[in-house]
Amino acid sequence: MAAAPRIAVALLGGGLGERLGNSVPKALFPLLGHPMIHYSLRVLGSLPGVEGVYVAFPPLHIPALEKALSPYPRGPLKAIVPGGATRAESALNVLRAMAVSSPDVVVVHDAARPCVTPSEVRDLLAALPGHDGAFLAAPSVDTLWAVAGDEVAGAVDRRSLVRALTPQAFPYATLRAAYESGLAEGFQGTDDVSYVRRAGGKVVWVAGERWNLKVTYPEDIPIAEALLGGQGCA
């Protein structure tokens, strides 16, 4: 029987939350009395096989994060890593910090998505073997139109489109190599999948939950709190 993969989590908490009207990183915004990042830490850190969680955070705000997390069990939280100027730079900083343990698999998640569920992550990891990456996604349910300015240019077939969510999972060596080469060559991807695909990787998508929302605007806060309080999120 093959040994279970050793899993590490890269939790990216670099967003500064300007659109929330916040002067501190979004991951520290309170939801139901707990910092937003607490929910992702609790779900991802409790999954079987996870040996370490590494958080990327704006360097000036790391003391505030340490203070916010001090009332909670540390669990598998291994390190808080200074984030970079972009999401991609933050991700690579974390991947480099993981080199000492060199995990088999890395799961990358945005701390601004606090409603991720354990079942989503289990489905994601189950889909990864045999591929260079897997990511959670939600099929589009709306009618989509391509536009040019304020004019409609044409319809888009939504059957071929999904909304990318996180977490996204990859073999550690695959993702690190993709980020190292991509950033060295000036590539500016929008998520982890974009770097792996640029490097020629085969990536599959896995259906995620519609309520795995990214908290971005003030009106997202009551929605997230309702989900966290009433639908079994962490």
Image (cartoon, helix red, strand yellow):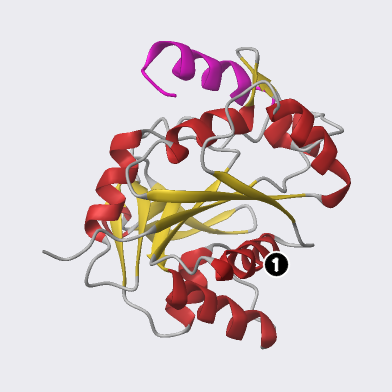
Quarter of the figure with the C terminus: top left
* Magenta stretch, main secondary structure class: helix
* Residue closer to the observer: 133 or 65: 65
Res. 20 image quadrant:
top right
Q: In the visual, does 69 lie left or right of 158? A: right
Q: Residues within 10 Å of mark 1 (few under 14, many from 20)?
A: some
Estimate the x, y position of residue 29 in percent, counting from the top left. Answer: 71, 26
Q: In the visual, does 42 lie left or right of 159? A: right
Check residue 226 for magenta coloring: yes
Query: Which residue occupies 53% across, 28% down?
Result: 39
Res. 46 image quadrant:
top left
Query: Which residue occupies 23% across, 66% down?
Result: 129
Looking at numbered disc 1 in the image, what kind of residue is underneath it?
Glu
Residue 56 lies, with reference to residue 154, above or below; the image says above
Question: Which residue is tagged 1?
Answer: 89
* Magenta segment boundaries in residue numbering: 218-234
Estimate the x, y position of residue 104 in percent, counting from the top left. Answer: 38, 67
Let me know if residue 206 appears in the view.
Answer: yes
* Residue closer to the observer: 142 or 45: 45
Query: Which residue occupies 67% across, 45% down?
Result: 13
How many labels, in total? Answer: 1
* Residue closer to the observer: 53 or 25: 53
Check residue 109 for magenta coloring: no
